[in-house]
Amino acid sequence: MAVKETIEAKQQIASPQLTGAEIREKIRLFPWWTVGLIGVFVLTAHLILTRPSYQDAFNFIRAGVGVTVQTTLVAYGIALVLGLFTGLGRISHNIVIQNLGTLYVELIRGIPMLVLIFFIAFVGVPAGVGLLNQIGEWFSQIGLQLIAQPLIQLENSSVPMTTRAIIALSVTYGAFQAEIFRAGIQSIGRGQMEAARAQGMTYWQAMRFIILPQAIRNVLPALGNDFVSMLKDSSLVSVLAVRDITQIAKLYAGRSFQYQEAYVTLAVLYLMMTVVLSALVKWIERRVRQDERNA
């Protein structure tokens, strides 16, 4: 009898009974929204597997996934570099650099993204090509034909729309990321810069080895969220006839008149990509917090 009571006591310790309040709390904290997402994905997969119209739409539209991902990755990489240097310029003690950085940020933030895409693609890029032609002529006058010829022969029509779209996204998001980097750098206490300078470091050495590593770690979640936002905003480049999934979905719907199949498939494809990226961002946030606790 004593042995039986001992075994029951051990089982209660190993698996304690939850109270009603604890059960209700677990139910409340359960991520029910994931059930909704899974339901959307399962329903869409069922439609694609069982209905030929949805299957045709999926097979046609998925060809643009590579262009969407490539455009986003390249544009985001350029925007990171542009945003970092602009953010550093925004906190620079040089009045010219500081005001140029501020002007760039305020201009970009004050114009709608769709307008910026049109402006950069049809005004900015042609102006840049004309400037490069003039630089090439100057190189030709001083005898540097090897450099001059490619610049002189460059034409506006030779710049593909995909490249213009990448430039537009990079310039736009560079301004947003500049503010993220600026806030991250300014979140680090001034005492750390002063301590680094007291140890004999130059300003740029202190910024590179002391301030920037901490600032980047602080702004990683915001940068990740910006990447997700850029993936969604990349749909705007379809106005330039870039063959991303949005443009291909529009072409399919216009050709087949199957608007429901085209845009349901398009929406779910974007949803799948953004959910995966959001999960990755949350994982990075957890890793950063764990590293901070372990440090």
Image: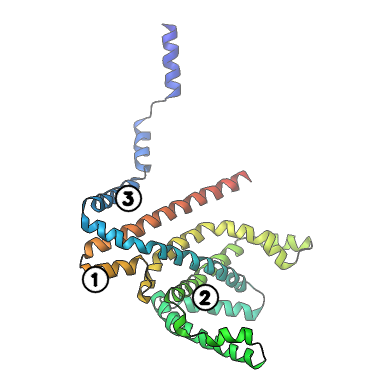
Decide which of tag 1 and tag 3 comes sooner along the chain: 3
The tag on residue 37 is: 3
Q: Residues within 10 Å of mark 3 (few under 14, many from 20)?
A: some
Name the element at disc 1.
helix
Q: Kindly identify the residue that appears in the image at 60 percent across and 86 percent down.
A: 148
The x and y percentages for residue 131 are 55, 87
Question: Closest to the observer: 150 or 203?
Answer: 150
As drawn, 58 above or below 248: above
Measuring 42% from the left and 21% from the top, which residue is drawn there? 12
Label annotation for residue 105: 2
Q: Nearer the viewer, residue 89 or 270?
A: 270
Q: Tell me if residue 179 can be seen.
A: no
Q: Give coordinates of residue 79: x percent, y percent.
A: 52, 69
* Disc 2 element: helix
Image coordinates of residue 18 in percent, x first then y, are 38, 29
The circle drawn on residue 254 is 1
Residue ID at (47%, 51%): 282
Depth-wise, is mark 2 or mark 3 nearer the camera? 3
* Residue displayed at 73% across by 63% down: 194
What element does badge 3 sit on?
helix
Within 10 Å of disc 1 (Cα), the crowding (few <14, some 14-19, many 20+) is few
The first of marks 2 and 3 along the sequence is 3
In the image, farthest residue toward the bottom: 141
- The reply to whether the C-beta atoms of the residues labelled 1 and 3 are less than 8 Å apart is no
Q: Which mark is residue 189?
A: none
Relative horizontal placement of residue 228, taking residue 133 as reference (left or right): left
Q: Nearer the viewer, mark 1 or mark 3?
A: 1
Q: How far apart are labels 2 and 3 at the CA level?
A: 36 Å
